[in-house]
Image (cartoon, rainbow, N blue to C red):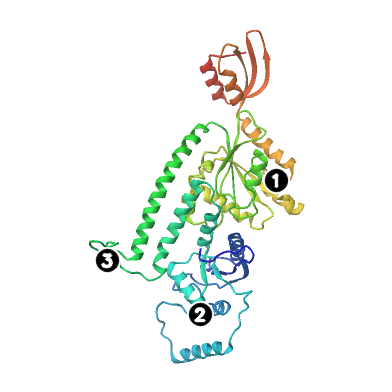
């Protein structure tokens, strides 16, 4: 990123929305509010938020001339785009624009350094030429929503696979923007020349394509190993925590499993799927997986890149939709989560339950109202131990619904049977006799069948 972030003084950012007629004022405000959190997570200080409703964000620039000049006054830019089609203007309009420019020039506008934005961030996806034109008009860095999300992912990726996935998405984002980065010289071809008649841009694009191909090979290798591990645990009951970013999935994961997973009050703090057993450990063992959070307008390339990471949700027997009830936009967040999961192939008939988190931050009247609409949901605060125990018991009881109780007798000379019993069954009671042990077990029917066939066991 061109702007260096300083811990002592954060760079200023001005947010710009360009809502089209199909976007309501409420949706626009929610989206800009979310963009503010994204930009803050990236390390900027947001000084202001403005928007201009337009019929379309297409064209040389997504804003009108007046709004361009208004923003340029804040940044100290010229307010003129570098390129673009020449618009025919009558003499009266040309004279009026000239007078405006002379008035601005003679006014000697002083910009407060403390309020001068170092970056203009648009709440939409900009084309490479639009970014270039806006930079020339404002004289500062210009980012779009996709660029901000890609940068956040780049900073928060921890594991080898997630770093590779983010790098692919970032390269795909940068590739079409290379041609706007500056001048291009054609390399000489022939003996002793560096290139083969390629321009600098063509050379850079080829390098990006080669790098993406290399990254994909590395990811395939990693995913083969993960597939092997996933196959080994495929028969174990698995719960996937899914939901909007910063809804509290990692906090719940930490409380349910006793693991030291990262918990931060930031967007996209978790990018790597973590799988841990439910703790205190149950028999059979139940696995809990924490997945990457979702967000509206999530770049398609990032969704595709993290498909393998989200496969834990594909293979889960139970989905827990974690929802931040204290966020006024939680309904939209739930809709985004469900549509994204459907997009990666999660079946609609997969068992699920809604868990409304952060009830400690809202009034009781809000909770009661939502309970009327979502009667079979859980309402919790991860800060409350009793609430976490309620989720634990719900998970345990959910998987025990399809289990049966049977008694089996295991002779002492039968090797390996007791170990498998303690791993795959819940032992309700056991009684030691002269020739062996009687067990009263709870488990799946297919597990009982496999146990009896493998060790030639009989019912009590």
Mark 3 crowdedness (10 Å alpha carbons): few <14, some 14-19, many ≥20: some
In the picture provided, is 303 more to the left or to the right than 114? left
For the view shown, which residue lies furthest in the left direction?
191
Tell us which disc is closer to us: 1 or 3.
3
Q: Are marks 2 and 1 in contact (CB under 8 Å)?
A: no
Residue annotated with mark 1: 382
Residue annotated with mark 3: 188
Nearer the observer, 47 or 369? 47
- Identify the residue at horizontal 67%, vertical 13% (top origin): 432
- Identify the residue at horizontal 56%, vertical 24% (top origin): 445
Q: Is residue 235 above or below residue 178?
A: above
Q: Is residue 204 above or below residue 422?
A: below
> Whole-Å distance between the Cαs marked 2 and 1?
50 Å
- Image location of residue 32, percent across then percent down: 59, 65
Q: Is residue 361 above or below residue 33?
A: above
In the picture provided, is 9 more to the left or to the right than 84? right
Residue 284 lies in what quarter of the image? Answer: top right
Residue annotated with mark 2: 79
In the picture provided, is 98 more to the left or to the right than 188? right
Secondary structure beneath dot 3 equals: loop
Mark 2 crowdedness (10 Å alpha carbons): few <14, some 14-19, many ≥20: many
Nearer the observer, 383 or 399? 383
């Amino acid at each position: 990123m061109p702007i260096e972030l300083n811990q002592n003084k954060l760079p200023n950012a001005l947010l710009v929305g360009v809502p089209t007629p199909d976007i309501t004022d409420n949706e626009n405000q929610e989206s800009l509010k979310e963009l503010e959190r994204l930009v803050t997570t990236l390390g900027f200080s947001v000084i202001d938020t403005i928007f201009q409703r337009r019929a379309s964000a297409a064209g040389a620039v997504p804003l009108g001339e007046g709004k361009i000049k208004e923003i340029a006054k804040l940044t100290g830019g010229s307010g003129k785009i570098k390129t673009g089609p020449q618009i025919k203007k009558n003499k009266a309009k040309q004279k009026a624009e000239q007078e405006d420019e002379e008035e601005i020039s003679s006014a000697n506008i002083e910009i407060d350094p403390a309020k001068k934005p170092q970056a203009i961030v648009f709440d939409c996806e900009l084309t490479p030429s639009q970014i270039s034109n806006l930079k020339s008009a404002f004289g500062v860095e210009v980012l779009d929503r996709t660029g901000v999300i890609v940068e956040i992912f780049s900073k928060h990726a921890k594991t080898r696979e997630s770093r590779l996935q983010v790098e692919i998405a970032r390269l795909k984002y940068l590739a079409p923007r290379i041609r706007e980065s500056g001048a291009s010289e054609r390399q000489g071809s022939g003996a002793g020349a560096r290139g083969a008649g390629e321009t600098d841009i063509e050379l850079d694009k080829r390098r990006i394509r080669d790098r993406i191909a290399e990254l994909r090979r590395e990811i395939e290798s990693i995913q083969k190993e993960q597939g092997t591990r996933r196959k080994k645990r495929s028969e174990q009951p698995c719960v996937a925590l899914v939901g909007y970013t910063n809804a509290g999935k990692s906090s719940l994961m930490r409380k349910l499993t006793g693991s030291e997973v990262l918990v931060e009050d930031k967007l996209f703090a978790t990018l790597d799927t973590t799988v841990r057993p439910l703790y205190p450990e149950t028999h059979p063992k139940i696995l809990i997986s924490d997945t990457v959070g979702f967000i509206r307008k999530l770049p398609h390339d990032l969704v595709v890149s993290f498909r393998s990471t989200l496969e834990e949700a594909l293979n889960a027997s139970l989905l827990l939709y974690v929802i931040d009830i204290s966020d006024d936009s939680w309904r939209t967040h739930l809709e985004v989560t469900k549509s994204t999961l459907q997009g990666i192939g999660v079946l609609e008939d997969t068992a699920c339950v809604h868990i409304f988190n952060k009830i400690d931050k809202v009034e009781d009247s809000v909770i009661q109202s939502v309970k009327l609409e979502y009667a079979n949901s859980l309402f919790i605060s991860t800060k409350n131990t009793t609430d976490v125990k309620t989720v634990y018991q719900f998970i345990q009881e959910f998987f025990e619904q399809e289990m049966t109780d049977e008694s089996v007798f295991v002779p002492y000379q039968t090797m390996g049977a007791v170990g498998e019993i303690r791993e795959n069954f819940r032992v309700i009671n056991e009684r030691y006799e002269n020739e062996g042990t009687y067990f009263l077990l709870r488990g799946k029917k297919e597990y009982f069948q496999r146990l009896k066939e493998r060790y030639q066991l009989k019912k009590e």
